[in-house]
Amino acid sequence: MKAKELREMSIVELNDKLAELRSELFNLRFQLTVNQLENPMRINAVKKDIARIKTIVRAHELNGEQQ
């Protein structure tokens, strides 16, 4: 997901997306453990998306923006 798309989302939407990505990361790690993961690079992509969202949420907090 692009950072530009994420900046256009509200804080509530970002938090929902963050929860979704965290659960996806959990599932990917589980699949990796049981050797059923088809694309191991997806784990890195999800981690980077989580970091992007957390960065944008923090920027909103520093700017004093509320939900």
Image (spheres, grey):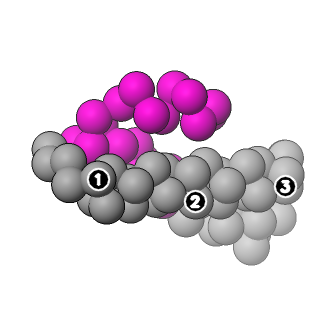
Please tell me whether mark 2 sits on a helix, a strand or a loop.
helix
Residue extending farthest left:
66
Q: Which mark is residue 38?
A: none
Mark 1: few/some/many CA within 10 Å (<14, 14-19, 20+)? few
Query: Is residue 16 rendered magenta in the image?
Result: yes
Image spot of residue 13 (x, y percent): 29, 37
Q: Tell me the residue that label 2 is attached to.
A: 51
Which residue is located at x 74 percent, y 73 percent?
33
Q: Which of 4 and 46 is in front in this view?
A: 4
Q: Tell me the residue that label 3 is attached to.
A: 40
Question: In the rendered structure, which segment of residues is drawn in magenta?
Answer: 1-23
**Amino acid type, callout 2:** Ala
Image spot of residue 21 (x, y percent): 50, 51
**Badge nearest the viewer, 1 or 3:** 1
Query: Is residue 20 rendered magenta in the image?
Result: yes
Q: Of the residues under marks 2 and 3, which one precedes in the sequence?
A: 3
**Badge nearest the viewer, 2 or 3:** 2
